[in-house]
Image (cartoon, rainbow, N blue to C red):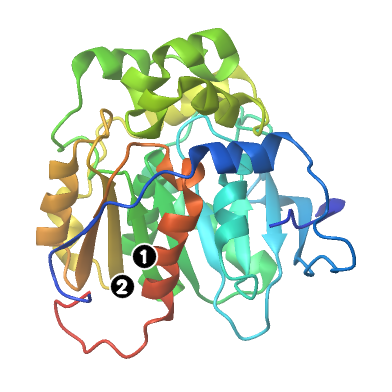
Amino acid sequence: MTADQVLPGPAGEDEAGEDEDRAGSGLGRILGRLLRSGPPGPPGLPEPPQPSERMRVLAIGGRNVRVSVREGTAGWPPLLLCNGIGASLELFQPFVDALDPRRPVIRFDMPGIGGSPAPVVPYHVATLPSLLAGLLDQLGYEQADVLGISWGGGLAQQFALSRRDRVRRLVLVATAPGALMVPGNPRVLLRMLTPRRHRDPGYAARVAGELYGGSAREDPLVARDLLHATTRLGPARGYFYQLIATIGWTSLPWLPKLRPRTLILAGDDDPIIPVVNARIMNWLIPRSRLHVYHGGHLELAADPERLAAAVEAFLDDDLTPEGNQQ
């Protein structure tokens, strides 16, 4: 293990079925936080302390993986975040900032993405639970809450199915059950076949609304900046490794076997993952809850306070009776 740096933390119904959230977007507010440093606040008032984040590179199963850990408060279960295709761990920063500072948070770059070197040979999502288990082992955690968005939602599902003892609760955001899903717009899916939006800011701005929906339709420049000003670029082949890692993979037949209590978050304007996929998953996963929010594929980063509140309520609720209530 090689420690890179210690980073100060940036400032910062329970019924089966669905919860319709119609709150407004905080996209401009989040961009302001990320891209400019304003005055520290009213004179004489100290800034609230923020939890520190430790960035390091861990060797796990022969792979070097860049990891960020926010320690949080002892005794709190950590939240392990699995990112979408081509996105480095920095994309999660607005969401991490919006979480309770007492909650430990673990983020990582997939091999070939962000600061993690690309592996020599491709991998498959079915082989990745050992990577996540090894990560938790090295950090000293027996169990974690796991949140996966988009591509990372598939990884989170596979981890929860393969290593049931390691997952306390599961949060699936803007994701689907893999190959057996209701596909998005074919034109949108074609754009997903290349990493160009991650490498060309102008192109990202042009396609953001069509690709991500929600807040990106209103302000595609902000979506561009979320992808470029706040993330770290990895080698192009890392994107293609992620793309082929899910070939032939589906969780659909095994969703009824998922044991952790599960929160499913889905946007009502997500061109990549139509909301009907979330409804199907909610129907198949025992003890799952569906929360449909107003927005698109990037709202976890674009409007983090709203979605963080839903995630916090779910993770903190230890009193819900067993059964198909959550």
Determine the image quadrant of residue 151: top left
Residue located 59% across and 26% down the image = 225
Work out how far the residue at label 2 is from the one at label 1, CA to CA, in angstroms: 6 Å
Q: Which mark is residue 170?
A: 1
Residue 307 point in image, percent of width and height:
41, 56
Residue 256 point in image, percent of width and height:
14, 64
Label 1 crowd (10 A; few <14 / some 14-19 / many >=20): many
**Residue 110 in view:** no
Residue 324 vertical placement versus 274 (above, below): below
Residue 254 vertical placement versus 63 (above, below): below
Residue located 44% across and 14% down the image = 194
Residue 186 point in image, percent of width and height:
20, 16
> Which residue in the structure is indicated by mark 2?
260
Circle 2: element type: loop
The type of residue carrying mark 1 is: Leu
Residue 324 point in image, percent of width and height:
14, 77
The type of residue carrying mark 2 is: Pro
